[in-house]
Amino acid sequence: MDLSRAGGGSYTDNLIGTLLAIFGNLLVSISLSIQKYSHMTLAGTKDPRAFYRTKTWWSGFVFTCLGEAANFVSYAFAPLALVAPLNAVSVLTSSILGFIFLREKSKPKDFAKSYGLTFLGYILTIGGTYLFVSFGPNSHEKLQAENIVKHLVGWPVLLYLLLEIITFCLLLYFYKQRSANYLVIILLMVSLLGSATVITVKAVSGMLVLTIEGNMQLDYPIFHVLFVCMVASVVFQARFLSQACKLHDSSLIASVNYILSTFFAVVAGAVFYLEFNNEDVLHICIFVLGTAFCFLGIFLITKSRKRSKTFEPYVTMDMTNGVPVIHDKGLVVQPDFNGSFSYGALVNNDGVAPAAIPVNLEPPPVGSRSTDASHDQPDPKKDLKKD
């Protein structure tokens, strides 16, 4: 970081907030990996237990809580514009974990062709993170209740909130009434809600830290108003995000949502908390450049993910036995558990012939059918002898 423009206390706060955000995002990505391992293990071993009855899943859940708590506290120390782009650490870590545990044998040329853009995304994301952390805003303010109220009644914040509400209502109208299920529209609503979330999270986290230090802030009405707004925005944000996941590809959602959410979070920090007021133009330009590198890196990382194809069966007739056979045109969604574990991506099935699943509809042999029929039909000669 640039020590020449940071005071001792503000530099320490920036460092604490940055480390907490990085640590929290690392824990969240690792916890998701552990929980995915738990689900895949249960699916492979045909274990009748539910996933929430396994120790592995609960350990991942504990890591998730610790990671989100670290992210929450980081907003009290570092500016919004510094903490929000650090969500790239979670995407980067998840991709690296998936790459490490992906057991795939390929030639060097094929490997470079398949993962060249991914490694370029790693480099851009790491370099961009260094730039925006080093040249990010260094403004710090004690988030007391009086200061937060002053920010709320300022005309820049009121204008920003008014524009945000009008834009959100227009997007919601097109989404609900016009059935505009475009990815950009849904993720714009998620990002607008996310900007309100980060504003309230920083305020609530800052007041909680001041309360722990001995300056009581919980008895002010503004704390309870912001806490309710924080919970409501998180709930609706998760709801719209889940709807986007049902309609569109998850890799595209990850990159576009990161870009839009980070952009609106940085704008919210600049308008609400005035984080860039004391920054010079050079530092702002380098900060924007580092953020742009992260945007491009995350896009390349998520673009290189393999998309799983759904099961699309088609039926053919085996001409030798006259038996209908079901073929699978796509990749297996969940690989069979064969004692090994592949995290982050499925086992490569490229070039493998489609699985043939014979249906148990084979008719009985013709000879046995004629023999049975001969026994069942009456013989007229035998009947005459009996008479």
Image: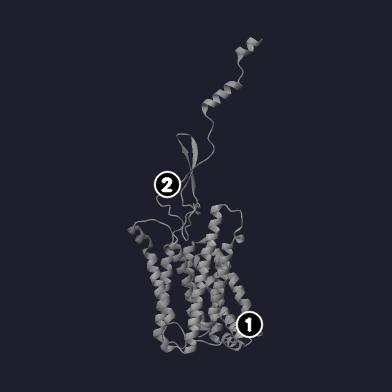
Amino acid marked by disc 2 = Ala
x 43%, y 76%: residue? 129
Q: Is residue 342 above or below residue 144?
A: above
- Tell me the CA gap for discs 2 and 1: 61 Å
In the rendered structure, find residue 288 and report the number of the disc placed on it.
none
Q: Quadrant of residue 113?
A: bottom left
Residue name at image x 56 percent, y 87 percent: 142
Element assignment for label 2? loop
Residue 162 makes an appearance in the image: no
What residue is drawn where x is 56% and y is 64%?
242
Camera-side residue: 210 or 147?
A: 210
Residue ID for mark 1: 223
Pinpoint residue 179: horizontal percent, then vertical percent. 55, 63
Where residue 375 appears, as percent x and y from the top left, is: 59, 21
Q: Position of residue 109 (x, y in %)?
A: 32, 59
In the rendered view of the protein, which quadrant contains the N terminus?
Answer: bottom left
The residue furthest left is: 109
Q: Return the residue at label 2.
A: 353
Q: Residues within 10 Å of mark 1 (few under 14, many from 20)?
A: many
Question: Does residue 40 lie above or below 193 as drawn?
Answer: above
The residue carrying pointer 2 sits among few (fewer than 14), some (14 to 19) or many (20 or more) residues within 10 Å by Cα, namely: few
Query: Horizontally, is 108 left or right of 129 in the view?
Result: left
Residue 368 in the image, given as x and y percentages of width and height: 54, 26
Q: For this rendering, which residue is in front, 365 or 56?
A: 56
Choose the circle earlier in sequence order: 2 or 1: 1
Q: Report helix, strand or loop for mark 1.
A: helix
The amino acid sitting under disc 1 is: Phe
The C terminus lies in quadrant: top right
**300 in relation to 71, above or below:** above
The residue lying at 58 percent from left, 72 percent from top is 234
